[in-house]
Image: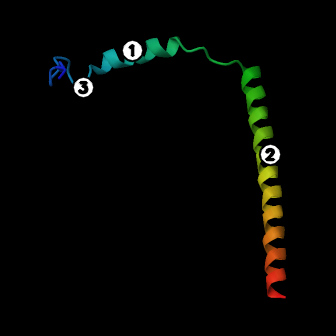
């Protein structure tokens, strides 16, 4: 049987960090982000809108086919 070592159940670091230190860390992490430029944002927005339109068209056509199949199937059974 293997023996496992566990970390202590308590930590010496405070649970609630210093607010000033937290803000400084957030600013430091925010400065590391590579923000997209306007052209990239516009391009990706247009791509998302096109994909949303194509997806809605696909599901509209699938819905038409299923509705046609169910309607005709029920009419065949009813007659």
- The residue lying at 78 percent from left, 33 percent from top is 47
Give the Cα separation between the discs numbered 1 and 3.
14 Å
**Mark closer to the chain start, 2 or 1:** 1
Give the Cα separation between the discs numbered 3 and 2.
46 Å
Do the residues under discs 2 and 1 have CB atoms within 8 angstroms? no
> At numbered mark 2, what does the secondary structure look like: helix, strand or loop?
helix
Do the residues under discs 1 and 3 have CB atoms within 8 angstroms? no
Residue 19 occupies which quadrant of the picture?
top left
**Mark closer to the chain start, 3 or 2:** 3
**On the picture, is 23 further left or further right than 68?**
left
Quadrant including the C terminus: bottom right
Q: Which mark is residue 16?
A: 3
- The residue lying at 32 percent from left, 17 percent from top is 20
Question: From the viewer's perspective, is residue 42 above or below residue 57?
Answer: above
Q: Nearer the viewer, residue 60 or 17?
A: 60
Q: Which mark is residue 34?
A: none
**On the picture, is 11 further left or further right than 34?**
left
Task: Count residues near mark 3 (Cα–Cα under 10 Å), then give few for <14, some for 14-19, many for 20+.
Answer: few
Task: Count residues near mark 2 (Cα–Cα under 10 Å), then give few for <14, some for 14-19, many for 20+.
Answer: few
Residue 61 occupies which quadrant of the picture?
bottom right
Do the residues under discs 3 and 2 have CB atoms within 8 angstroms? no
Q: In x, y percent, where is residue 52? A: 75, 43
**On the picture, is 53 further left or further right than 37?**
right
Q: In x, y percent, where is residue 41? A: 72, 25
Q: Find the residue positioned furthest to the bottom.
A: 79
Q: In x, y percent, where is residue 35? A: 62, 17
Q: Which residue is mark 1?
A: 25
Task: Count residues near mark 1 (Cα–Cα under 10 Å), then give few for <14, some for 14-19, many for 20+.
Answer: few
**Mark closer to the chain start, 1 or 3:** 3
Q: Which mark is residue 53?
A: 2
- The residue lying at 15 percent from left, 20 percent from top is 8
């Amino acid at each position: 049987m293997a023996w496992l070592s566990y970390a202590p159940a308590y930590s010496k670091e405070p649970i609630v960090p210093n607010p000033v230190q937290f803000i400084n860390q957030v600013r430091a992490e925010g400065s590391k982000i590579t923000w997209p430029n306007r052209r990239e944002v516009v391009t990706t927005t247009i791509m998302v809108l096109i994909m949303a339109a194509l997806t809605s068209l696909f599901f509209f056509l699938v819905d038409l086919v299923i509705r046609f199949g169910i309607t005709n199937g029920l009419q065949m059974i009813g007659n």
